[in-house]
Image: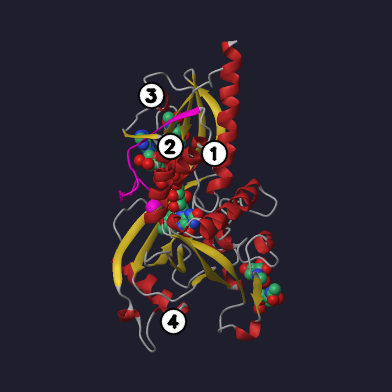
Amino acid sequence: MATATNNIVILGAGVSGLTTAYLLSKDAANSITVIAKHMPGDYDIEYTSPWAGANFLPYVSQGVGKSGSEHERWERDTWPTLQELTEKHPEAGIHFQESIVYNRTKDQGSATGEWFAELVQKDPWYKNVVPDYQDIPASQLAPGISNASKFTSVCINTAIYLPWLVSQCLKHGVIFKRAVLKHVAAAAIHHHNGQPADVVVNCTGLSSRKLGGVLDDKLYPARGQIVVVRNDPGKMVSISGTDDGEDEVVYVMTRAAGGGTIIGGSYQKDQWDPLPDLNLATRIMKRAVKLCPELVGEGQGIEGLDVIRHGVGLRPIREGGPRIEGEMVEGVAVVHNYGHGGFGYQASFGCSRDAVRLVQEALRRKDRAKL
Ligand SMILES: Cc1cc2nc3c(=O)[nH]c(=O)nc-3n(C[C@H](O)[C@H](O)[C@H](O)COP(=O)(O)OP(=O)(O)OC[C@H]3O[C@@H](n4cnc5c(N)ncnc54)[C@H](O)[C@@H]3O)c2cc1C
Ligand SMILES: *[C@@H]1O[C@H](CO)[C@@H](O)[C@H](O)[C@H]1NC(C)=O
Ligand SMILES: *[C@@H]1O[C@H](CO)[C@@H](O)[C@H](O)[C@H]1NC(C)=O
Ligand SMILES: *[C@@H]1O[C@H](CO)[C@@H](O)[C@H](O)[C@H]1NC(C)=O
């Protein structure tokens, strides 16, 4: 008996679309086309994934992410895969890095404090998920810092990892096409074999706000400005807040394989400006050097930073959390997987596995309808 061919179109080639395509492509019965306006290699304000750090630091976003939540399940489910890729697939461009997280009691209730609440929690859910978790004794903390912890996390070089996902997909026969679609239902006629798609997976990130058939007004950006530098402090650091306003943050992480160090940042809700604000960039660099003096030589300030580039990405935040669900849109079975805020990488495998289950359900419904 010949295996049935499932025609699947995936819209979007960010980390969400590529991870979903990668997982689905492992089943030889799936024939997959990925359609996107932007592909790995592009840098554009409408394409969030290349701008991410990216590391694994469990956050709360819009009230989701608390321990026991679905969000926790997605991240819990993603860590082992990131760990395995780091250990067994150096060509994926991910490495382990020590991560230090600082807590300031005074950030309680602020925008960034809320965002960091789960991360800086006493006995957080991820304590036994990531390796080497430990509290740093109060006696070792600088003035102004209330608590700190450290653990082993990963830092993903997105310039290597996104193309790696594409390569894995290509190896499994996935076809990539550039197109800009106005409506999710239009994706159904874009399968490379000319037949209508059985399922369309919608991984359009922030653009889902404008996509015909979706028009999700629960989506909004949290603007993240970063500076990429050549300096390497040899560790990652982040803190629950700054004294420069509620929507400014500090974090430092070094990407694998010569990817440079990302210093951030900001979490500016409803801000769409694609251009780096150079005053903000100066504050970002000053804060980073203060929190992580190992970035520069002894006694140096921001003049000790060797800047590669400034950048801005828009985190696709969705009120109530990401949308991972199936629906029929004008007769087309659609599975949505968008709205991953600031956690698109660290929740990527958990979210995409859920999307894959929904695709499988839609295919089973389709097969039953054919009987
Ligand atoms: C500064 C910054 C730092 C971050 N750090 C981290 C981190 O450390 N860890 C972490 O886990 N996450 C981090 N994130 C969040 C992460 O980057 C996002 O959650 C993730 O990239 C979202 O990916 P996505 O695939 O959903 O969307 P995107 O990457 O935006 O991809 C959307 C895709 O859909 C395509 N598309 C959209 N509309 C259409 C259309 N109509 N027709 C055709 N194609 C279309 C686009 O071209 C693109 O290919 C960070 C984000 C920023 C901005
Ligand atoms: C960090 O501070 C918050 C208050 O801002 C507090 O709720 C939390 O318990 C603190 N974390 C630790 C480890 O004490
Ligand atoms: C965190 O710091 C606060 C303020 O100093 C303190 O009350 C609290 O006990 C600390 N938490 C832990 C887990 O030590
Ligand atoms: C994908 O979801 C977004 C957000 O809801 C929507 O705007 C868009 O039309 C959807 N695309 C498809 C192909 O369903």
Task: Name the residue at the top extreme.
Answer: 371
Amino acid type indicated by mark 3 = Ala
Picture quarter with the N terminus: top right
Dot 4 or dot 2, earlier in sequence: 2
In the figure, 17 relative to 59: above or below? above
Amino acid type indicated by mark 4 = Pro
Q: Position of residue 236 (x, y in %)?
A: 49, 70
Task: Name the residue at the bottom extreme.
Answer: 299
- Within 8 Å: ligand 4 and the Cβ of disc 1? yes
Amino acid type indicated by mark 1 = Arg
Was residue 317 drawn as part of the magenta stretch in this picture?
Answer: no
* Residues tagged 4 and 2 counted as in contact (Cβ below 8 A): no
Depth check: give the residue in front, 319 or 260. Answer: 260
- Within 8 Å: ligand 4 and the Cβ of disc 3? yes
Q: Is residue 197 left or right of residue 367?
A: left
Indicate the quadrant of ligand 3 in the picture.
bottom right
In the figure, 21 relative to 304: above or below? above
Residue 293's mark? 4
Was residue 33 drawn as part of the magenta stretch in this picture?
Answer: yes
Magenta span covers which residues? Answer: 30-50
Which numbered disc, 3 or 2, marks the residue closer to the eye? 3
Is label 2 in a helix, a strand or a loop?
helix
Picture quarter with the C terminus: top right
Dot 3 or dot 2, earlier in sequence: 3
Residue bearing the label numbered 2: 208
Task: Give me the C-alpha separation between circle 4 and circle 1.
Answer: 40 Å
Is label 1 in a helix, a strand or a loop?
strand
Residue bearing the label numbered 1: 323
Q: Can residue 118 be seen from the camera position used here?
A: yes
* Residues tagged 1 and 2 counted as in contact (Cβ below 8 A): yes
